[in-house]
Image (cartoon, grey):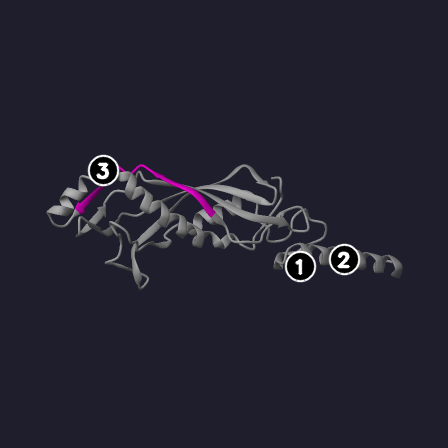
């Protein structure tokens, strides 16, 4: 049955106004793919699927431990992506929404990742040494992912800025998991380098890498919220 012209005109105006208002709230292609009166825009992800996407992005990600200076500079004698540094590969673990997931324009996810065994070059007592981390099976890096969110103009949230990675903490590295090779001074240094100092170096590198790899979440729409 054909709707009267007045009714059709009003419906078109209302739908057009709704799309325009939504588009102003979040600049994402999903907003023009809305169908009927659905609760969520087409292409929107649930909180759990969004978390799973971020977790999958970490798997196999080629990261770097940047060269450092100081009393015992690290990773100055090797290259990573053509620049001084030590190659490091991330392995996915888990990404879970914090409780509460979102408040006051920010959202938070708690993530864990692992890394593959790796080699780091370092200077100790003036000698060039090689730190070989041969077992990372029990090493776990925990971080908080925080990112700004806004209304998607419907019933969800829109990720509109890069994620910030904070409070990265590593545990599980034992003194038996790594060795320090080189001359006699390196051997002596090996007995003096605690696992905690190596964990701190790895934590800084992982935090920087996660900031890059988690950028896949920018521009995503999360719906419904609250889940």
Question: Depth check: 143 or 46 in front?
Answer: 143
Quadrant of image for the C terminus: top right
- Tell me if residue 220 is in the magenta stretch: no
Where disc 2 sits, the SS reads helix
Question: From the viewer's perspective, is residue 19 above or below residue 112?
Answer: below
- Name the residue beneath numbered marker 2: 17
Residue 1, visible in the rendered structure: no
The residue where tag 3 is placed is 175
* On screen, residue 22 above or below 199: below
Separation (CA) of disc 1 from disc 3: 56 Å
Check disc 1 and report the residue beneath it.
32
Q: Secondary structure at mark 1?
A: helix
* Other-residue count near label 3 (Cα within 10 Å), few / some / many at <14 / 14–19 / ≥20: some
Residue placed furthest toward the left? 184
Q: Position of residue 136 (x, y in %)?
A: 29, 42
Residue 27 visible in the current orientation = yes
Residue most extreme to the bottom: 82
| Residue numbers of the magenta segment | 165-180
Marks 3 and 2 in Cβ contact (< 8 Å): no
**115 w.r.t. 27: above or below:** above
Q: Earlier in the sequence, mark 3 or mark 2?
A: 2
Cα–Cα span, label 3 and label 2: 64 Å
Say which label, 1 or 2, has the lower sequence index.
Answer: 2
Where's residue 26, x and y in %? 64, 55
| Number of other residues with Cα within 10 Å of mark 1, as a class: few under 14, some 14 to 19, many 20 or more | few
């Amino acid at each position: 049955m054909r709707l009267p012209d007045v009714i059709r005109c009003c419906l078109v105006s209302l739908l057009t106004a709704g799309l325009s208002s939504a588009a102003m709230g979040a600049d994402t292609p999903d907003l023009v793919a809305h169908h009927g009166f659905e609760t969520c825009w087409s292409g929107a992800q649930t909180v759990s699927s969004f978390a799973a996407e971020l977790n999958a992005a970490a798997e196999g990600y080629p990261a770097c431990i940047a060269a450092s200076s100081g009393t015992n500079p690290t990773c100055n004698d090797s290259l990573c992506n053509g620049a001084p540094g030590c190659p490091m590969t991330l392995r996915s673990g888990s990404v879970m929404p914090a409780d509460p997931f979102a408040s006051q324009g920010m959202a938070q996810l708690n993530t864990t990742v692992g890394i593959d065994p790796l080699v780091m070059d370092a200077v100790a007592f003036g000698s060039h040494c090689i730190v070989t981390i041969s077992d990372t099976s029990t090493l776990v890096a925990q971080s908080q992912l925080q990112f700004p969110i806004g209304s998607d103009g419907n019933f969800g949230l829109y990720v509109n800025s890069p994620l910030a990675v904070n409070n990265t903490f590593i545990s599980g590295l034992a003194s038996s998991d790594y060795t320090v090779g080189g001359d006699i001074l390196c051997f002596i240094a090996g007995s003096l380098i605690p696992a905690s100092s190596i964990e701190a170096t790895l934590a800084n590198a992982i935090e920087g890498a996660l900031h890059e790899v988690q950028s896949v979440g920018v521009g995503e729409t999360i719906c419904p919220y609250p889940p």
